[in-house]
Image (cartoon, coloured by chain):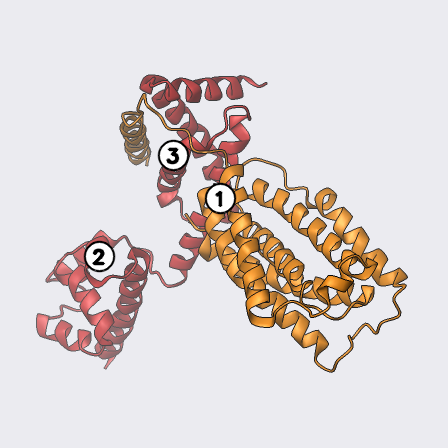
Amino acid sequence: MSDKEAAWSGAMRAARLGDSRAYESFLKDLAASQRRIVGWYALRLGLNAGNLEDVVQEILLAVHAKRHHWDDRRPLVPWVNAIARYKMIDATRQMRRDARCRIHLADEEWAAIFADEQMPGDRSGADMERLLSTLPSGQQSITRAIGIEGESPREVALRLGMSEGAVRVAFHRSLKKLMALAGESTKR
Amino acid sequence: MNVVDDNETRRTDMLAARLASETDTESKPVLPFAMPVACGVALAAASAFSVVLGVIGHRADLAQVWPLLTFLFKIVSMGLAAAGAFLLLLRAGTPGLPIRPLPVLLPAVAMLVAGAVLDPSGFPVAGQQTFSVLKCLGSIVLAALPALAVLLLTLRRGVPTDLAWAGAVAGLLAGSLGAFAYALACVNDGFAFVAVWYSVAIAIATAIGAAVGPRALAW
């Protein structure tokens, strides 16, 4: 049995007896080791390094949520690795899906562009309204909510009964469209 | 960049601390996965049998044919397939176990191949009636669908980490149970008919399972 296996399964058993300190140090240790693996994996696939820590946290949450399922007669390290691998692949797929229709700016930056009166092209609010009105109504309300009223994608998702991912995607798609439209009208 | 990284790392450490504060002394270890699987498989088998017996009904001469080799071939080969798939299902819901499908499926595969090649019955591969093949495929897949739904719900009680594989295994087991149940209704007794068309039907159920697995099992 490796040192890691002994340490981790020991900590997990201790956690079952209520030793939260052992469990915390196990989770931090797990985070450190997954951070290396996720970083290496992302490098190899050429993924955006920005949300790697989110993936590490997803893994921690998953292991925590399923901790009672671990059979302590079996080794813990392969159990944890299988879960980590699943969460990593899942996150990669989501990042790819997002990346296809995303211009690389964080939501806050987008919101800042919208809020800024002196945005490129020096557009007035009326111009913005006119551009917005060319979007389909669903995209319009999402773009208004996030871009102008400053709601978070999560809030909008809850309000409209959509998934957060779908809201983000719709938001980014409409922004892309708006940028294209704004570019056209500037040229004219 | 480093500052950001440190912040992010600290955020994760805080998460670890918060999760650790949720440990409770009266921890409730989950039932071993074998328990829900046993119940799920029993329920899946019951649903497959009710579809076959309810929709088609058992063959009229069941009382006469059950001791015959042709009938036993169906029951035993499908039983072996279901048993192998059962073992794979247990593993598919438990992280970190090796997959190894070959050894557990070998008995069923060997029996079906031998049946197809050596077929002593002399019945046609395409069945006795015009629509034998379609009826066989349709009935088995139909009987497998509710069983598949039950097995996917069962898998959600475990911790599947390769969702397409887990879905495929659930489909394989559902298909085997559907075929086992259909054997009570099927009037085509050729070994080759069973070996070929039952297998195709199970393959269809397996493919359906693999296709829906990633969505149905995501957690």
Q: Is the same chain shared between marks 2 and 1?
A: yes
Q: CA distance from mark 3 to mark 2?
A: 25 Å
- The residue that mark 3 highlights is A60
- Which chain comes out orange in the rendered image? B
**x, y percentage for residue B136?**
67, 71
In the drawing, does residue B113 fall left or right of residue A135? right
- Give the residue type that dot 1 points to: Tyr
**Residue B9 seen:** yes
Chain identity of mark 2: A
Q: Mark on residue A86?
A: 1
- B33 or A9, which lies in front? B33
Q: Residues within 10 Å of mark 3 (few under 14, many from 20)?
A: many
Q: CA distance from mark 3 to mark 1?
A: 12 Å
Q: Residues within 10 Å of mark 1 (few under 14, many from 20)?
A: many
x 51%, y 55%: residue: B213
Furthest residue toward front: B63
Visual hue assigned to chain A: red
